[in-house]
Image: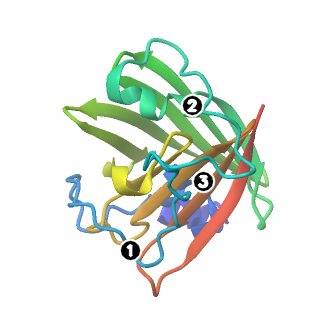
Amino acid sequence: MEAARALGLAVLTLAPGLVACRSGSGSSQVAATTASPATPTPAPASASGSPSPSSTSSAAPTAGGTATGSLKLVAWLEGSWQGKQMDDAIVDETWKVTGPMTMTGEGKATKGGDVLVEHLRIEVRGEDVIYVATPGGGSTTEFRRDPRISGATFATFVNEAHDWPTHIRYERVGEALMVHVHGRPDQFETSFTLTRR
């Protein structure tokens, strides 16, 4: 967080991996996932009980690389994405399937020639899909994909024990990623769009 402030970046308006700079208690353990009142509402269920895509969402993109099993639930993140924040920081995120149960990524925020980088990873551990964020020089924080508030083209990663954020949500809409990051109901939240580069 201090590194981000030293760069003059608005810490709370960076990409999801970049806002997870503080590790709260320093623990890298994932808390039990519970829905928060501030959690975005998933798409309405169809007659079969599965979420139906929103009117602006395309069908689930084909999983890239060698993703298997539960990793296919988030393989649509694969690619290079970029967006501009309201504080004029340029945010880049790149995701690549690097194994049947692993994706690796990098988040980068650039403002006025200064750059803040964060290493990202998504891993399958048993039945869980875990989002792992490690800011340059910082502690690792983990978030678990909550299947109750995730679907074919959107995923919400939760760590209720983390100070902020507690929820990171990605939604694939055509060639764009809609991102929503928030904490508890009384905390800051932000939404932005990343488009494919």
Q: How is the image coloured?
A: rainbow
Q: Amino acid at mark 1?
A: Ser
Q: Considering only order in the chain, which callout, 2 or 3, is on the residue closer to the N terminus?
A: 3
Q: Residue furthest top?
A: 66
Q: Amino acid at mark 2?
A: Trp
Q: Nearer the viewer, mark 3 or mark 1?
A: 1
Give how far across and how far down residue 127 sits, in percent.
Answer: 22, 36
Which residue is identified by label 1?
36
**Alpha carbon separation for disc pair 3 and 1:** 20 Å
Q: Are marks 3 and 1 in contact (CB under 8 Å)?
A: no
Residue 73 appears in the picture as rendered: yes
| Label at residue 76 | 2
**Alpha carbon separation for disc pair 3 and 2:** 17 Å
Residue 9 appears in the picture as rendered: no
Q: Considering only order in the chain, which callout, 1 or 3, is on the residue closer to the N terminus?
A: 3
In the image, what residue occupies the spot 71% across and 38% down?
A: 58
Quarter of the figure that contains the C terminus = top right
Query: Up-down: is 84 above or below 73?
Result: below
Query: Up-down: is 169 above or below 154?
Result: below
In the image, what residue occupies the spot 42% across and 57% down?
A: 149
